[in-house]
Amino acid sequence: MKKVIATEKAPAAIGPYSQAIEVNGMVYTSGVIPVNPATREIPDGAEAQTRQAMTSLSNLLEKKLKPEKEEEPKEEEKPEKETDAPKDMKHQQSETFRCIRMIYETLLDNEVNERYVNQILDDVEKNLRGSASMDIILSNVYQKMVLKFGQPQKIELVPGQPKIVFFIGPTGVGKTTTIAKVASRFKVDYGKKVAFLTADTYRIAAAEQLRTYANILDTPLTVIYSSEEMNAAIERVKDYDLVLVDTAGFSYKNEDQRKDMRNLIESLDDKYEKDVYLVLSATTKYRDLMEIVDKYHEISDYKIIFTKLDETSSYGSLLNIRMYSGADVSYVTTGQNVPDDIEIFQSQKIVKQLLGGR
């Protein structure tokens, strides 16, 4: 039920608008300006103007509570002329819908999974009060997506003992090159003592690839052939700050190799603090990524490094996997150059690109 509220004790509405409309017990007012309705003048000073605006608003509410017969709405203010305010509301709601629809389609175009798009936009819509501008909607979506990504969990060293970091993942995702980039950052940029271990004895020349980086960085490299050799190898570099462990890449469907990987990680003595990073390619299909993260969860809890961001223009998988697995995205790589093409994950940068920015 709609009712027009009008009074001569508040500034008259301009054009097709009404001073106030009551719809189902809720009163919607137009902008209440600080004009004295008797003199049509604006008082001097912010305090006086505020008082005048509040007085006019109070008169409108009083009119709603105690309607006066002698103040019947003028002809141009009668209901048939006063459908514009609800129409305007509908127009604003339509604009809000169009904005949300545009964001929805943009995220889908960037390969964010529809389930997560709906989840994010539903959360945003719950926090919007009535209609909202494009800027407000975008700001809310942006903040929500940044929060979904969370904070990157970078490698933190442990005083007095080496930090052991395992790099696991499928074949061909760039684990060895990523290890070299991390090692270079800690040794060259931070001046830390870094050592290499490799358990990748499946791939031809895998150890030699890492040895090349070890020679360039003047860093020790130990090859281990079984989980039983892990702690002895660590003991030989116990005075180092950081030990980076390269592991064999394998198909996530290979149960025997998953078991070997789990045994390798679990063989590390509990006195050492460890991190496990699952290295994934940003070019991998989302369906395959889901299977990979599920299978590797059987091996260990992990944080994520995404590689090959330079080989794709769509970053939806980063958000998909973060929301699907719950694992923190910590680093990303953007090329083959060592040590330059690696950085700590910046959620703001990725979210901006997912929303159509550059």
Image (cartoon, helix red, strand yellow):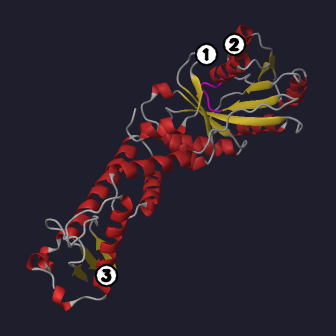
Quadrant housing the C terminus: top left
Q: Which residues are magenta?
A: 169-176
Q: Which residue is mark 1?
A: 338
> In front: mark 1 or mark 2?
1
Q: Name the residue at 24% across, 77% down.
A: 9
Which is in the foreground here, disc 2 or disc 3?
3
Q: Nearer the viewer, residue 11 or 201?
A: 11
The residue nearer to you, when weighing 40 against 175, is: 40
Q: Is residue 171 magenta?
A: yes
Q: Which residue is mark 2?
A: 213
**Residue occupying the far left of the picture:** 75
Q: What amino acid is labelled 2 in the image?
A: Tyr
Indicate which disc, 2 or 3, sits on the residue closer to the N terminus. 3
User: Does the magenta-highlighted stretch encompass residue 179?
Assistant: no
Residue 205, horizontal then vertical, whole percent: 68, 14
Q: Is residue 91 visible?
A: yes
Kindly state the secondary structure of the residue where label 1 is placed.
loop
Q: Eyeballing the image, is 215 above or below 8?
A: above
- Closer to the chain start, of discs 1 and 2, is 2
In three-dimensional space, the C-alpha distance between marks 2 and 3, rounded to whole angstroms, equals: 73 Å
- Residue 30 in the image: state x and y as whole percent: 26, 68
Please report contact status of discs 1 and 2: CB closer than 8 Å, yes or no. Answer: yes
Q: Could you tell me which residue is drawn at 49 percent across and 48 percent down?
A: 143
Residue at 59% from the left image edge and 45% from the top image edge:
150
> In the image, what residue type sits under mark 3?
Asn
Badge 1 crowding class, 10 Å Cα cut-off, few under 14, some 14 to 19, many 20 or more, is some
The residue lying at 27 percent from left, 64 percent from top is: 33
Q: Amino acid at mark 1?
A: Val
Main secondary structure along the magenta-highlighted residues = loop
Which residue lies under the disc numbered 3? 24
Residue 345 placement (x, y as % from top left): 58, 34
